[in-house]
Image (cartoon, rainbow, N blue to C red):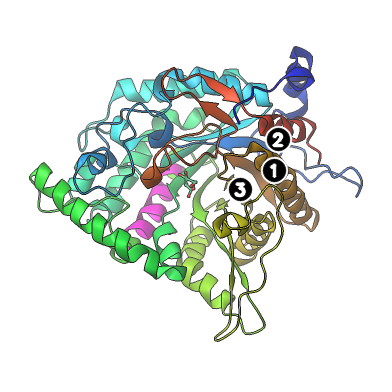
Amino acid sequence: MSNPIDGPHLDRRSLLGVGGATLLAAASPVPVRAASSPTRKSFPHGFRWGASTAGYQIEGNQTNADLWLMEQVQPSAYAERSGDACDSYHRYEQDIALLKAIGLNSYRFSVEWSRIEPVRGEFSHAELDHYRRMIAALRKAGIDPVVTLFHVAAPRWFAEAGGWLNPESPDLFARYCDKVARELGDGMAFACTINEPQVGLTFRAFSPGYFKAKDEIQARAHAEAARRSGTTQYVTMDHPDIVGMTPQLLSAHHKGFAAIKAARPNLPTGVTLNLVDFEPGNAESSHLAMREKAYGAWMDAAKQSGDFVGVQTYRQIPIPGAGAKMPPLPEMPFTDPKAMGEMIKQPSALRNMVEYAHQRTGKPVFVTENGLETDDDRRRAWYIPQVLAGLHQAIESGLPVIGYMHWSLIDNFEWLQGYKPHFGLASVDRTTFERKLKPSAAVYGRIARSGRI
Ligand code: BGC
């Protein structure tokens, strides 16, 4: 799994070749369409090729984040603690070296609210400087920073004040967005407001049973976190009341977007949504109703406040009509047929959701996450060209697609599941923090460097 990439793909000449060919001026968020033939299958000039991460999942020791306490309490819904994570807080230069070695021109990562505003209303110059250095290092490497302002983790004081159930939360978020945009906006190529604010709603829409047991543990864990904090409430993104949080999350996106655009009018900004591809299970399928239930409010929000809509698709789920049987599952190589969860991660899912998101919002689409959880990197190496071929078809049919950010650059802390699931283009040794590119990174790099599939 963790073989380093060898040989010709990573020689100095081919790395230098990345320079002129695919580095981008961020004038317009939508790449210019290139003339292409059916045989060459070129992606548009200016297409963003990248990988995604998130601060809490890779930086390590984020002791001031609301989730840190959720890992410590009993009961806890977390399989293990995040601890040092990948130590990317100190080793971001190594992550940038990986991006360069693969041949990518963009990097999506998050700045962490709990570091930047450790105490309500008090911003840390030192932590802003940390992210300023990171953005400068990316720019120096010729890599465009795609910056998420909120990726699941909040400051502990925010959770103690009621998190996203707090009516003040949209204004608190907007103040933080204003600060980040003013301080760091000049170096940023794209800004993403809130990561997957609807993922809890979406997953509950098609799998309410799964959440029943989880929600019971989460309710007890959140009550225990409030007790330990000496507050009446403690509300994180994992709190069971996602329905109650949604009006504030929607308002926070609108206000955050407005704050960023007021500070940096030319910074392309949007929300990034987890879109499961609900497909027709048969003629009677209610998949369109399911999509509207799971995504409708957020599609409207992306349409109203957004220069682009971020699409993050991992799954395809056929929705059968009443009484109908599920269709047979499609074939995928290197797959354990008993593992249905793996079988439903079809490459066509991304193309379908890119089309849906554009049709529903009228906005350019940015694939801000997509990837595969597997310990068998041959599957990832198979998956990447398949999924990109589908994306290319969408672009050829006229859809404005800004770029593709593979999740993830490195194996990392997969929230409640801990470190077991592996999504990375590179592995990370949990003790030495040594990063090693996997063979699939070479497959992706060849496509990214040439801009062709
Ligand atoms: C999230 C990431 C997560 C990934 C893989 C997305 O829903 O934004 O934080 O690690 O999926 O599970």
Q: Position of residue 224 (x, y in %)?
A: 14, 49
In three-dimensional space, the C-alpha distance between marks 2 and 1, rounded to whole angstroms, equals: 7 Å
Q: Nearer the viewer, residue 158 or 325?
A: 325
| Residue type, numbered disc 3 | Val
| Residue type, numbered disc 1 | Ile
Which residue is rendered at x = 35% and y = 26% of the image? 84
The answer to if 342 sits in the magenta stretch is no
Which residue is rendered at x = 59% and y = 47% of the image? 370
Badge 3 crowding class, 10 Å Cα cut-off, few under 14, some 14 to 19, many 20 or more, is many
Instruction: Kindly indicate whether the residue at mark 1 contacts the one at mark 3 (C-beta within 8 angstroms).
Output: no
Point out the image quarter for the C terminus. Answer: top right
Instruction: Kindly indicate whether the residue at mark 1 contacts the one at mark 2 (C-beta within 8 angstroms).
Output: yes
Q: Is residue 6 above or below residue 334?
A: above
| Residue type, numbered disc 2 | Tyr
Q: Which mark is residue 444?
A: 2
Q: Is residue 31 above or below residue 82?
A: below
Q: Is residue 126 above or below residue 238?
A: above
In this figure, which residue is indicated by the disc labeled 3? 367
Q: Position of residue 437 (x, y in %)?
A: 61, 25
Report the mark closest to the observer, 3 or 2: 2
Left or right placement of residue 96 versus residue 115 in this view:
right
Label 1 beta carbon within 8 A of ligand 1: no
Which stretch is magenta? 247-260
Name the residue furthest top. Answer: 12
Name the residue furthest left. Answer: 230
In three-dimensional space, the C-alpha distance between marks 3 and 1, rounded to whole angstroms, equals: 13 Å
Q: Position of residue 112 (x, y in %)?
A: 36, 34
- Of marks 3 and 2, which one's residue comes earlier in the chain? 3
In this figure, which residue is indicated by the disc labeled 1? 384
Badge 2 crowding class, 10 Å Cα cut-off, few under 14, some 14 to 19, many 20 or more, is many
